[in-house]
Amino acid sequence: MKEQIERLKKEKEAVILAHYYAPSEVQEIADHVGDSFYLAKVAKSIDAKIIVFCGVSFMGESAKILNPNKKVLMPDPTADCPMAHMVKEGKIAEMRAKYDDLAVVCYINSTAELKAQSDVCVTSSNAVRIVKALPNKNIFFIPDKNLGSYVAEQVPEKNIIVNDGYCPIHASITARQLKEEKDKHPGALVLTHPECEKELLLMSDHIGSTAEIISFAKSSDAEEFIICTEDGVLYRLLEENPEKRFFFPDPRPCCTDMKLNTVEGVLSVLMNENNEIKINEDKRNSALIPLEKMLELAK
Ligand code: 13P
Ligand code: SF4
């Protein structure tokens, strides 16, 4: 399959992008692997006719919004992020009516529909910096309450109202599970994604996006780490640090949507050019504004 994929990639001028949560064998065949911010940047600058996006639909959609002239294909079109839909209809308009100077800050883990109604997008690796840089005092942060609350603590000078969405995978890691793991590995550093609950963040040594967790583990002198994020990051953690030891809270956090990406799926979309992301042009144009603003402000 790998040989067929390589041949088709050359023949069709295609590139494969994968998120760190995709299965190991998919990360292994990808041309670029990264966190949401890195993948959005790569998608914007890449020279290819076809992008095969091994992630969930908001990631494929973002790539399409940034690249209207490229075909963006998903190995499994049902791979979706439940949090991306967690803003109630009418909520944004309600908040805009309440505050004159409101900025709607949209975590990239959201549908194109929600992005189209927002002022700026952020990812977990640039949310604090971008919110700080906005001139607005009042911020409505959608859809993730946990990332939103984390940003609010880091930027106390702003009035940040958080929406009540959450990632079911990160939000279900409990402080008790983490404590049990810490008791088993008392010397381990705890590295946590900001989509986790505050209780967990308070017990952590480092908080960051998937890419930030990976780079922290690499540059740290510590030898053992407890990782509070989805278990797909283990592939890169072990590639870069074969001598270090990594543990996860039990049960190991696993995003079933991300795991829908398979090597067979990649080969199939490369052959058939199916599962193409399509977005209505008006919606695409509106959603492009906050995505481009993110790329600009994050520079
Ligand atoms: P990152 O931007 O840290 O890769 O996070 C993406 C994601 O879906 C987290 O659950
Ligand atoms: Fe969405 Fe959570 Fe899966 Fe990330 S881990 S894609 S936020 S459900």
Image (cartoon, grey):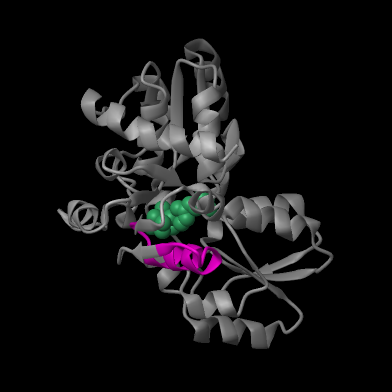
Q: Is residue 49 above or below residue 233?
A: above
Q: Picture coordinates of residue 280 (x, y %)?
A: 21, 27
Q: In front: 200, or 257?
A: 200
Q: Total marks drawn?
A: 0
Residue 62 shown left or right of residue 298 in the figure = left
Quadrant housing residue 146: bottom left
Q: Is residue 240 above or below residue 264?
A: below
Say whether residue 284 is visible.
yes
Residue 204 shown left or right of residue 54 in the figure = right
Q: In front: 137, or 74?
A: 137
Quadrant of the rendered image holding ligand 2: bottom left
Residue at 30% across, 67% down: 164
Residue at 54% across, 61% down: 231
In the rendered image, the residue lying farthest to the front is 100
Which residue range is magenta in the image? Answer: 142-159
Q: In front: 10, or 17?
A: 17
Q: Quadrant of the C terminus?
A: top right
User: Would residue 259 be counted in the magenta stretch?
Assistant: no
Q: Picture coordinates of residue 234 (x, y %)?
A: 62, 57
Quadrant housing residue 207: bottom right
Q: Is residue 286 above or below residue 101?
A: above
